[in-house]
Amino acid sequence: MTTGQAGTALGCSIPTVKKLMATGVVPGVRETGRQVFPLAALQALQGRPVADLTVLGAPEVAVLRSDAPAKVDESDREWIGFGTALDRGQLLAALSGWWRCDPARVAAGGVLPVTVAGFVVAVLTGLAEWESDGTVGTAGRFRFPKARLAGYLTDLTAPANAATPTDPQDARLAGLLLGTRLPSVSGGPIAYVPTTTAVDQPDTEGGVTR
């Protein structure tokens, strides 16, 4: 399938499809020549269920809308974004900050699903503490230094947690969320999604983990 055909089938734009392919979670992607989306993978993704957020026990949950991995020159991490080529430590550092957000609102949900193209590819917990970059007002960025990588995927078509969480609650949350579809709308990397309804939304995955 072309990326355009895949986007139509998944209800998202061509750039969003290409971002999903760049993360490495779609097996069988052609690396050279014209980019194509494997038909078997597309059929598997079309069958992924919508996340049931009603079981989370909070009125809303924050969602980190990630981009594909990108190299950065920062003291505490080498990468931002999500990608299967990153090891567990690199991935946690890449996803646990620094974002423009309301940190108390993020923490209140108790879990932070990480999505690419509306699919949950990773799950963070341990959000009770946060640090600010010192910027005053809404432009401030925050990170969660005690965040845990409760789960992440290396193959979105056959979701299996590549992490080994020792906390039973972490394992439960990862099992509930990984591989599901979780649409969200936001002008930045963090969206806030009500947990009482599950409504399909148009593709708006333009946020990056910055």
Image: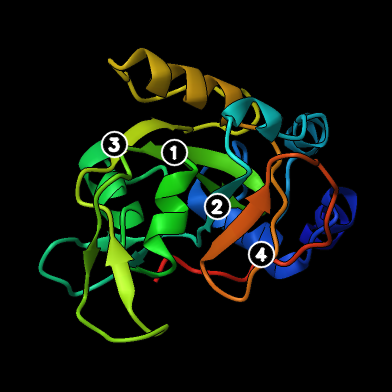
Type of amino acid under label 4: Glu
Q: Secondary structure at mark 2?
A: strand
Q: Which mark is residue 148?
A: 3
Q: Earlier in the sequence, mark 4 or mark 1?
A: 1
Question: Quarter holding the C terminus?
Answer: bottom left
Quadrant housing residue 147: top left
| Image quadrant where residue 44 sits | top right
Q: Nearer the viewer, residue 24 or 210?
A: 210
Q: Mark 4, residues whose alpha carbon is within 10 Å: few (<14), some, or many (≥20)?
A: many
Residue at 59% in and 61% down: 191
Q: Secondary structure at mark 3?
A: strand
CA–CA distance in space, label 1 to label 2: 11 Å
Q: Is residue 34 visible?
A: no
Residue nearest the observer in this picture, 23 or 49: 49
Q: Which mark is residue 205?
A: 4
Q: Which-is-in-front pick, marks 4 and 1?
A: 1
Residue contact at pointers 1 and 2, CB within 8 angstroms: no
The residue beneath circle 1 is 110
**Residue placed at 83% from the left, 49% from the top?**
10
Q: Earlier in the sequence, mark 3 or mark 4?
A: 3
